[in-house]
Image (tube, rainbow, N blue to C red):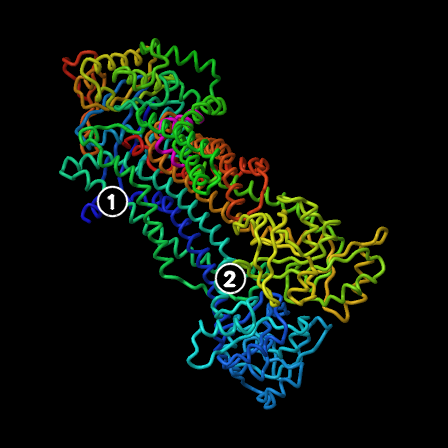
Amino acid sequence: MIHLRGISKRFEGKRTVTALERLDLDIARGEMVSIVGPSGSGKSTLLNLIGGLDRATEGEIELDGATLSRLSDDELTRVRRDKLGFIFQFFNLLPTLTCVENVALPLHLRGWPRAKIEARTKELLNLVQLGHRLDHQPDELSGGERQRVAIARALSVYPPILLADEPTGNLDTATGVEILKLIHDVHERLGATVLIVTHDANVAESCERTLRIRDGRIVEDIRRESARSSTEEPTRA
Amino acid sequence: MMLWSLISWPYARKHLLRWMLTMAGIVLGVGVFVGMHTANRSVLSAFQETIDRIAGSTQLQVTAGEPGFDEDILEKVQNVPEVRAAAPVIEATVATGSGNLLILGVDMLGDRSLRNYDLEDTDASIDDPLVFLAQADSLLVTKTFAEKSGLRVNSRVPMRTMQGDLTFTVRGIMKPGGLASAFGGDLAIMDIYAAQKFLGRGRKFDRIDVALADGVSLDEGIAKLRAAVGSGYEIAPPSSRGEQFEQTSRIYSLASNITSVFALFIGMFIIYNTFAIAVTQRRSEIGILRALGATRSQIRALFLGESAVAGLIGSTVGVLFGIVLARAMAGYIGGMLTEVYGVAQRAGDVALDPLLIGGALAMGIATSVVAAVIPSRAAAAVDPVKALQKGRDQAVSERENRLRQWTATLCAVASAVTLAFNRTPLVFYAGFVLSVVAAVLLTPALTLWLARLLRPLLQWARPVEGTLAADSLIQGPKRTSGTVAALMLSLALVISLSGLARSSYEAISDWTRIALNPDLFVTTAQSVSARTFVFPASLGDGLRKIQGVGEVQSVRSVRVNVKGSPVMLLALDIASMEQHAKLPSVQGDPHEMYRLTAKGEGLMASENYMRLHGAKFGEVLDIPAPSGRLHLPIVGVVRDFSDQQGTLIISRAAYVRTWNDDSVNVFRIYVAPGAQEAAVRQRIIDTFGKTQRLFVLTNGDVRRFIRRLTDQWFGLTYVQIAVAVLIAVLGVVNALTVSITDRRRELGVLQAVGALRQQVRHTVWMEAIAIGVIGLVLGLSLGVVTLYYAVGMARRDFMGTEIGYSYPFDTALVLVPVILFAAFLAAIAPGEAAVKGSLVEALEYE
């Protein structure tokens, strides 16, 4: 599903900072992978590259058959639009739009007919248990509710890949657990490939696979038979 | 200073483009102010220089307005014991193949005691003035003109004179400097009696230049001369001609002041806007400074200091721009004044006035600082704790909104009340200011309301892009309302100026139809207003004999000084005027006024004379004339556009009697019934064209000439319109640049969830177009009010003529696509900026 070959990312400035160094990675369809590591290790950079938000300095990323480095900006946007859903730490909802409008945003951008958009947005907001908050604006919602809206927006076209950057990082523990449960639920019901960047050990351990990154390299790739419990002993690759 | 270098400069450097756009209003305002005033000053200074150089050692000049006076006055002046030297002068500007040439007719016998003719390559004979006199075709030219025209001593110069085509001979070439540098060097000297023939002046002089005997003061000289020549003459130093010229150019100074003030006023909103946004964006920075111990006054001083620096930079660039503008405008204004008022000057270089430049710099800085007062107070009031919390603070508080709306309502009501009592200028202008203030204060609320109205429409057009564009306006009132206010004011200005121009054109067109209805005009030049040459009255008799000529009106138009101001005196056959071209009466019995004027028992004044000079119906005017002072009551007020300073109409008989001048500027000819206009015209040319300098213009030619003059006058209006629209467009660019910075994260999210770059551009473009639509709605509406005041101002202070209120719907219709297109153009660069740059950084942007 996702294949990375020799991926490096360097930021040029007064001095060059290497965020990722010759990284290889394969993620199978339907896998749920967490990416952990200390701040500045390159985990968010990795997620941004896989999500087509940024371009690698070297190497190739293949995403569901599409080689990202060969795509123009607009082609990259189409890949994001059709194959990816993003969940951000700070939700990144548009503050002026209602829940329905935020969720409908990617569908409008795809040019869907209004009736179909309306049906899909209601279905998604019901899925994230916000059917009663359709016309509320983000500032009228709690943090957890905002993240639910963000998840609904990420799922709007039922993308095969879901990318989450610290999805519980801005939430209290109880809400974080709820959101994590929702992501697992979506993963199971839709069979989507999910990548979660997190600092939270519970979140990481809840995934069937965890990548540990340090200084731009994958230093550990842990696979778990059953990821539902964080108390189980992990299986090292 | 430390705060400035640590805080302000890095911020300014980061937002360089925005600051440059912010300063644009100041640049244009100061630029127009410096440009127009420097141009006016340069023209005036060139005029003064020409006067000085021609004056030589002249201390006093004896004049009697444009008609001049009889030769015998010279003897009276020369007989005054206090006069050391007195020499007659005729001065006129004529068009030549090498441009305008100033002809100075002098009496070489006496003139050398006043002026120094420093000659080179001279024919020895010219050193003797008697020889110069004896050869009536003698001409002295300057070296500058000789080189320009390829002339040498003894070169023959053909000229079309009032006595047919004559050939003059260059007898001498004056060395550059002194007299020879007057009028940019385009000067020729001829014998005064030759000049009389050449220009058709009969036995008249334009003026007598006088040098007083040693030890005689100017006041004493004036008193003695007045006693000798009578009170109908004006006796003043040469420099006083500059003052008269200044008066004639006063109206241009006023117009340029209004443009500058408006440009600065609009610029003020853009600066306010930028600072209001800067305060919002720098809240956390202000919070940190406050937390670290900066006092409120230090924060306030920081922002006011930034605005002063922005004002200084903007004003400095504006001054430089103004100097460039002045170079372009000096020729234009000078040309217009020469054409309309016949005053000779040649503005070669711009004359810079340190005081004007200092004033302009101060004005620019003051505008910038005043604009930043409210935002800097807001910055000083920032709560450090709240400021350090994340989140935007864009919404206008309810309390602030209510206060604004209440103040706006009060201003609007007060403005409406002034309408009932606006007879005095103060109340009138207060009403104008109050209505504009009310509109400006209401702008945020109206912008919000209109943006909400537009949202469904934009959403319908483009569900995502349209919604985001509208929401951006709704959510960023501080960001938008300043720009909308600037756009609104600019458009209101455009509507006012355009409406004024339209009303004026309509009024002038009506007047032209009534007053200038003769079929043919026999003139001495291609310009109807030129008064350099004059016809002898006898030509009228000759014209009457031409087959097909029905009626001939002899018209003499001269500028005379009445109550210290140069006014146009129009002398013609009043009975014929009443029959053929009866001007609309504004005050007085329409028949009685013509009857009394025809009898020489009164005069008719134009409406603009009455208003601009504060004259009253029935008032007896004291008009200086060579035969004494003419006292005539104003027996009627008519609508007439012959002259911007006002016109006095008297009977030709009274004029001829009083000025002893039967010459004619224009013969107006009504073709006999059944006669062909073209055939009559050709007959006139065939009969007189070879022996007489003469032009026969058709009614269409004259109308086109008037139209061209009106266009020239409104040429300044178009400059004002261009400045207003330019500033408004810069305001839109500024608002959008800020908007995309403000919404960087939002636009990043949009791209992250799948918006193509074109869709992001569409959002920015739609926001610009929405600003344009809101600005158009508010500006075109405010234009209804400002046009009312503009028409009032024109009536009171500029034209002095009653002109109708006519909303320029055609201009409004043109403005819609122009502004929307300009808004779209303004959005292109910000739109590109929105899709460039790192998406990752945009998503992390706070």
User: Which quarter of the rendering shows the C terminus of chain A?
Assistant: top left
The chain that hosts pointer 2 is B
Q: Look at label 2 and name its amino acid.
A: Phe
| Region rendered in magenta | B466-484
Q: Position of residue B257 (x, y in %)?
A: 44, 50
Measuring 32% from the left and 24% from the top, which residue is drawn there? B398
Classify mark 1: helix, strand or loop: helix
Q: Quadrant of residue B284?
A: top left
Q: Position of residue B127 (x, y in %)?
A: 57, 88
Residue B56 colored magenta? no
Q: Looking at the image, which is closer to me, B237 or B307?
A: B237
Question: Which residue is under mark 2?
Answer: B245
Query: In screen coordinates, is B177 left or right of A122?
Result: right
Classify mark 2: helix, strand or loop: helix
Query: In screen coordinates, is A58 left or right of B594?
Result: left
Camera-side mark, 2 or 1:
2
Q: Look at label 1 and name its amino acid.
A: Ser
Q: Looking at the image, which is closer to me, B491 or B579?
A: B579
Please say if B103 is above or below A119.
below
User: Which quarter of the rendering shows the N terminus of chain A?
Assistant: top left
